[in-house]
Image: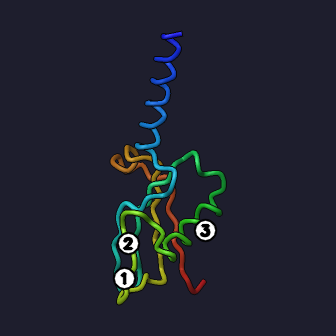
Amino acid sequence: MRCRRKFLIAIMVIVCLIHTIIPNKPQLISSITTLDSAYLTILVDKREIRNIKKLEEKLVQMCQGDKFEKIKLQTEDKKLPEKLNISVYTSRKDLEKGDLYMKFTYNEGD
């Protein structure tokens, strides 16, 4: 019984660590904005990717709504450019290695 309890505690700790390392919600890692374009690097939990088109739509909506937790894309005097160049990584390790999961461009006018 005691061994089982230790095992369950170990499993809970591992799950907590995984959720800390791999976010459930997409995270904006960096953004570079020019006059007409924004270049965004986003970290996405691979387990959340089921449909690439829906993921693209979700990320664009998050950018337009400025829904990222750590980095704000828009200020009162500066709006997001119409062209978004989005690079997506599925882990910090992949990001450090430059192992890109996908890349896409969104033009508001299209």
Q: CB under 8 Å between callouts 1 and 2?
A: yes
List x then y, in percent, for residue 85.
Answer: 46, 71
N-terminal of the pair, mark 1 or mark 3, is: 3
Q: Does 92 sit above or below residue 57? A: above
What's the distance in space between the residues labelled 2 and 3, CA to CA? Answer: 19 Å
Q: Does 51 sit above or below residue 73? A: above
Q: CB under 8 Å between callouts 1 and 3?
A: no
At mark 3, the secondary structure is helix
**Residue at 43% across, 81% down:** 80
At mark 1, the secondary structure is loop
Q: Does 42 sit above or below residue 14? A: below
Q: Residues within 10 Å of mark 3 (few under 14, many from 20)?
A: few
Task: Specify whether 102 is left or right of 80.
Answer: right
Q: Please name whichever residue, 73 or 109, is drawn nearer the observer in this view of the structure.
A: 73
Q: Which label belongs to residue 3? A: none
Q: Which label belongs to residue 72? A: 2
Q: Which residue is mark 3?
A: 57
**Residue at 49% across, 11% down:** 2
Q: Residues within 10 Å of mark 2 (few under 14, many from 20)?
A: few
Disc 1 or disc 3, which is closer to the eye?
1
Q: Which label belongs to residue 75? A: 1
